[in-house]
Amino acid sequence: MFKLERKILLTPGPATTSNSVKNAQIVEDICPREKEFGYIMEYISQELTKFVADIENYFSVLFCASGTAAVEAVISSIVENDEFIIVINNGAYGMRIVEICKAYDLKYIEYKSDLFDEIDINEVEKIIKNNKKIKYLAVVHNETSTGFLNDIGSFGALCYKYNIDLIVDAMSSYAAIPISMKEMNISYLVSSSNKNLQGMPGISFVIAKRKLLENLKYKKGRNLYLNLYKQYTYFLKNYQMRFTPPVQVLYALKQAIYETKNETIEKRYERYSKSWETLIKGLNDLNFTIYVKGRKHSKIITAIDEPLDINYSFIGMHDYLYNSGFTIYPGKIELMNTFRIANIGDINFNDINDFLKYLKNYLITLY
Ligand SMILES: *Cc1c(COP(=O)(O)O)cnc(C)c1O
């Protein structure tokens, strides 16, 4: 195994990976159309499903692209001309789903909700009651711009009542926060390889009810490369991607899945939670302001107010920390000056304590 210098990525994906995941990419050359590679693909697809659902009734369809592509694959494949989709927008990633709807000229209703308040599900219900053509509801689980965790269970119950398919962007919650697609009544769930799975970037996937995937046969879809039905049927038949996959990234994903199973999602979330609590305590000690509080916080990513010091700049802080081995992330909240710290990946609370020391040293340089 190659031993590489450890860098701490406090970014919401790609995250810090283990040495074994990095090394899993060093394999003999292989054509992805070989049977041997098909077994790996089959393993990956099945295990991804098993983290959140049973493989008899649910299936994981993989795409060779970052997470947004898989969200786009779902939206562009399922919503038909005479149907409406309601999109819950309480942050930048909810807004991205709205943008996808716009790009395909879909009939969509945007439900905008305050960034830091619970979504008013009764208001959403009123809209659904008044529009019988709403067939889908899309919502982000962990809104990565703020760290606000939306209550998927309540949306699942609402969708059940009105016979609507629930689409969940679980990009930054899957493989950390326990999810049951059946209990939460999720029809389509989307995530990717490089966040809490702690794999390499390049693969995203849609986990869906098999029955719904089969029914896509009757829909035309609006995209060739990101066609969910075509990708599903081709994969079922051959255990191959329709187009060239990033072979080595898939070997790394297989290893990352293996390590996730070993740790278990529950234990992984405990590890993340401990890192997060360490982070919050340290930030409080340094007088930083944090917006999402209490039980609505995902404990995965935190948006933090930028320091007001005249000598502060995000680039200055970033570069100082980067040169010390820590990568931080800019904010993504409109009209607010925030930066973000994610506590995901192959790190623990000791790494967060180290980070806090360097952060404190940076603040001292400002005076
Ligand atoms: C990371 C993320 C995405 C996808 O981003 P990509 O850069 O396309 O991988 C989508 N939604 C949420 C909530 C995310 O955190």
Image (cartoon, rainbow, N blue to C red):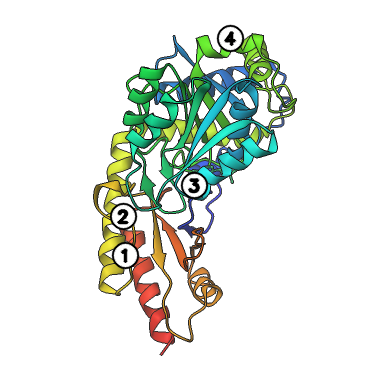
Q: How far is mark 3 from mark 2, CA to CA?
A: 23 Å
Confirm or reject: label 3 Cβ below 8 Å from ligand 1: no
Look at 65% across and 9% down and name the residue there: 218
Q: Mark 1 points at which residue?
A: 353
Residue 19, image x, y percentages:
49, 47
Q: Does the residue labelled 2 lie within 8 Å of ligand 1?
A: no
* Residue type indicated by callout 4: Asn
Is 260 situated above or below 89? above
Alpha carbons under labels 4 and 3: distance apart: 42 Å
**Seen in the image, is 74 located left or right of residue 327?**
right
Q: How far apart are marks 4 and 2 (CA)?
A: 42 Å
Name the residue tied to disc 2: 276
Look at the picture and state if 24 lies above or below 284: above
Residue type beneath disc 1: Asn
Instruction: Inspect this view and state whether residue 263 appears.
Output: no
Question: Can you give x and y, in whole percent of width and height, for residue 195 in the image?
Answer: 48, 43
- Residue at image coords 33%, 63%: 290
Asked if the residue under mark 2 is in contact with the one under mark 3, i.e. CB atoms within 8 Å, the reply is no
Few, some or many residues within 10 Å of mark 3 (<14, 14–19, 20+):
some
Q: What numbered label is drawn on residue 19?
A: 3
Tags 4 and 3 in contact by the CB under 8 Å rule?
Answer: no
First-in-chain label (4 vs 3): 3
Image quarter (top left, top right, bottom left or bottom right) of the C terminus: bottom left
In this picture, is 7 found above or below 311?
above
- Quarter, ligand 1: top right
Q: Nearer the viewer, mark 3 or mark 2?
A: 2
Q: Nearer the viewer, mark 4 or mark 2?
A: 4
**Disc 2 from disc 1: Cα separation:** 11 Å
* Residue located at (62% from left, 35% from top): 101
